[in-house]
Image: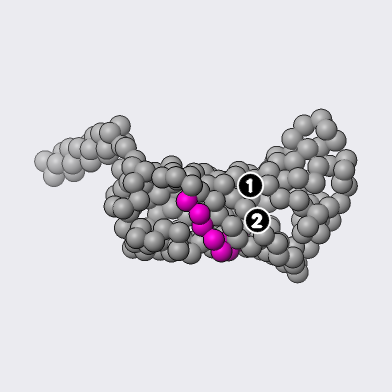
Amino acid sequence: MAFLAVVSLSACTKIEQGLAVLSHDVSTRIAPIPAGVYHSDPDHVFVHFSLWHLDYSQFTGRFDDVAIALHFDPSAPTQSQLDVDIPVASLNSGSAAIDGMLKTEFFDLKAHPSIRFTANTTTLLDAQTGQIEGMLEMNGRTHPLLLEVVFNGYAKNPLTGVPTMGFSAHGELDRSDWGLGKWVPAVGKTVRLQIEAELVLDP
């Protein structure tokens, strides 16, 4: 009987979770979002980059390890502090040979193992969109970077119950500004960034 009770309880829990997922809805209102420190969910954060290769196609890659920290205050969202840390070693283009070349012939991995972005100014354009201006430290050089950001919404995650926010962002940079201009113009110097992130509230 005890075994049947455990099985029944487990089935009920899964049904409740399934219903929560099916009825899940996010809000784009900022006011009800709890204040606190939010960190990126490692399973739901993506930083992709692309640039032209010999004018044939867009060479595309990503970073497998991304850590985002957001100190958020709903009463003053533009004053929130944002920091991003990306280990260069996590670069992944799908080709081990190309990754090895990028980490040694482009990036100085040993001297500068991380890419860091720190936000300086956040501007709200409307209820869901804004711009973040900050400083990008990469390959031993630091220059400004502008990101166009979309706030996708907030809700408690239906599977974990944890307050979660979702964002999308994109931007462009001239890689030569960071000493990564090898093979320009055969390989494009403009790098396009696409970022998708789910941020969860620290306990």
Q: Is mark 1 on a helix, strand or loop?
A: strand
Which residue is farthest bottom? 111
Residue 122 magenta-highlighted: yes
By secondary structure, the bulk of the magenta-drawn segment is best described as strand
Which three-letter amino acid code belongs to the residue tagged 2? Answer: Leu
Question: Which of marks 2 and 1 precedes in the sequence?
Answer: 2
17 sits to left or right of 100 = left
Query: Which x, y percent locates residue 36?
Result: 36, 63
Q: In this view, does 94 lie to the left or right of 47?
A: right
Report which residue position mark 1 lands on. 171
Q: Are marks 1 and 2 in contact (CB under 8 Å)?
A: yes
Look at 80% across and 46% down and name the residue there: 189
- Residue drawn at x 83%, y 52% is 181
Residue at label 2? 145
Q: Does the magenta stretch include residue 93?
A: no
Q: What distance separates the C-alpha of mark 1 from that of mark 2?
A: 8 Å
| Image height of 65 relative to 58, above or below | below
Q: Is residue 125 above or below residue 122?
A: above
Find residue 111 and report its horizontal and vertical position in percent.
75, 69
Magenta stretch, residue numbers = 117-124
| Three-letter amino acid code at the position of disc 1 | Gly
